[in-house]
Amino acid sequence: MRKLSLLFVFAFAALSLAAQKKSLSYDQAFKNNSFDLLKQLPSQVQWVDDEHYTVYSRNAEGSWNWQVVEAKTGKTVPNMHPPEQETMIRPGDRQPASEKRNVTVSPDGKQSVYTKKDNNLYIENLSTHDERQLTTDGSQTVLNGYASWVYYEEILGRASRYRAFWWSPDSKHLSFMRFDESQVPVFPIYWADGQHGWLENQRYPEAGDKNPEVKIGVISVADDKTVWADFNAADDQYFGKPYWTPSGQLWVQWMNRGQNNLKFYNIDLAGGAKTEVYDEKQPTWIDLDDDNRVDFLESGKGFILKSDKTGWRQLYLYDMSGKLVNAIANGDYTVGTIYKIDEKAKLVYFNARKENSARWDLYSASLDGKKLNRLSTGDYSWTGMSLSPGNSYFISTYSNISTPSTEVVMDMKGKIVREISNVKGASFDAYALPKKELVRVKSADGLFDLPVLITYPVNFDPNKKYPVLVSIYGGPNAGTVYDQWHLTPAEIWWAQEGLVQVAFDNRSSGHFGKKGMNYIYHQLGKYEIEDFMDCGRWLKKQSWVNGSKLCITGGSFGGYMTCMALTYGADVFDYGYANSSVTDWQLYDTHYTERYMGRPSDNPDGYKKTAVLTYADKYKGLLHIIHGTSDDNVHMQNTMQFINKLEDMKKYFELMIYPGERHGISGAKGLYNRTEAAAFYYKYLLNKEMPGDFWK
């Protein structure tokens, strides 16, 4: 851990200089009023060839322009044109104003498939615009190609927009999931609109409940016939996103309800018979929502699998029969995204957190696993990788907590060929900006050096005592502390006002791989809050911290952590601002909760010792609770049960309800929520009047 005395020396030296610099106004900090402190990086789109790439940027009139740029010199090439842009509708694009949902064009561009509100699949010939109905049994509880909520939220992901169908590469087949929700419990969400209000009935399986039954279908586009994969839909199981191999085989990911056994099956397209290709078991859990678990070799001779079975997410080469060839990357570090597989050179390019768990670097590794090279350089985190077709260059953005993000062209020897741009605006040096520091705090059991990111107040004086605002999330593999440039106008504002702003990560955050995450198995929340308490105790020992003004805030899992901090951890944390909080894991959905906790009937003690309600009697300090009445992710039921218990115990707290708001509070209510939070910080942490501009 770096000695803070060095920071103090620097603080005194910089104090007089900082005092001469500009401060942000309210409008600059919160109303997005244009000023030239920071600027956006240009967006690199794609490589044209090994020496040229396309970028798009906004001109003075506000329109977007394409340019082709020479990588080595940065010169615009006027006689070259960007590759023709895809105009077909793809998943994630804005959908047409019609009843069609998730319009997805076939790879050959001749047909499109979509679902409608009747929960059936349809196909349209794009030349004749003739439409055919592919399924007929859709209903309120039978969904063809449209995901059940728990699959959308936890397995296929929000980016899917509920799409649960996939084209084969030759455009001849369509795989899809059919969901039967008829046995899934209904959770009523009350809307207080109008004279009588109304109920939104959501099919939502809470921990231990019945899940939707799922069938995997394959439609032959030539005759519209459906073949069902050979699984028993009534079994307690999950299916991940299927893969189409380069040769047109359909591979289905299957997982047991306990989520500790993952299998891949190759499905016979003619009859639905399944052949096991891969089988992995772990003593805790395996993530099914990994959208990029498998990357196929273009030759069709094998695939690269990402797995954290050793305790760290690494790369493994398999042949197409499922036989392990060798490990490609192996060690106590986390691999991220595969950017390219070069079979000719027998190399794979990927990023990883190897040199420092708070940084990403670009690496190449030989497919035989014998050579590993770091291609990025310096004490920076490298993001936004894009490799040229011939692997002569890559474009990336480097930064750390004190180095503003800078986009560059690099060669494969780690040399910066050319700087493209950076985020420093014309008046960057004219403003007084807060300094940041990343330190490591030892966990109480001595096993982990927990990362803590501190943003000091502008004109920081180590002889003063400052209130501290800790912003956290805390969920598994969802760390927030990185050695990367991140500075927002709002963050600068609070630094100007005299708040120390802090983020810290626990052992399950991803910094310590799956090895660290395994500690939380069957006790989700216990080690996380204890690690946060260790970080909080360390903060209170610092001479510049006001020991009675340690506030923590977060939303969703972060709201859960905040509620735990003011109950389980009330001897450490003084204030909390909790958004949309889970308060008892029995009230959250099956797939997420049971992954870590098992079913309530199998782990009653674990559920009890991780529930906020269990520690309500320890509550002290002041907790401000907010929740949207129509939250369909973390139901307001969580907050209602918690405040019911606090009221019965005569515990004082603050509560704000947002009518009709979902899990994310937005629009006018979002603005009010932000203002409400500011009022809380001014009143209890800063002990001064909030500027009137906040309420205008």
Image: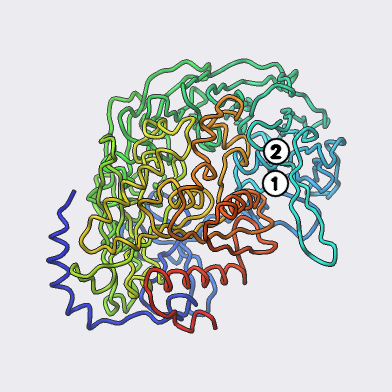
Residue placed most toward the observer, 433 or 413: 433
Question: Which mark is drawn over residue 682?
Answer: none
Relative to 620, say whether 525 is above or below: above
Q: Is residue 70 left or right of residue 587?
A: left
Residue placed most toward the observer, 591 or 94: 591
Relative to 424, say whether 20 is above or below: below
- For the point 43% across and 73% down, which residue is it? 683
- For the point 85% across and 62% down, which residue is it? 196
Quadrant for the C terminus, please: bottom right
Q: Secondary structure at mark 1?
A: strand
Closer to the chain start, of discs 2 and 1, is 1
Classed neighbour count for the residue bearing mark 2: other residues with Cα under 10 Å, few (<14), some (14–19), many (≥20)? many
Q: Amino acid at mark 1?
A: Thr
Q: Is residue 111 visible in this depiction of the protein? A: no
- For the point 83% across and 37% down, which residue is it? 134
Look at mark 2 in the image and give the residue it sits on.
165
Look at mark 1 in the image and give the residue it sits on.
104
Q: Is residue 273 left or right of residue 691?
A: right
Q: Nearer the viewer, mark 2 or mark 1?
A: 2
Residue 144 in the image: state x and y as whole percent. Answer: 78, 37
> Image quarter for residue 118?
top right
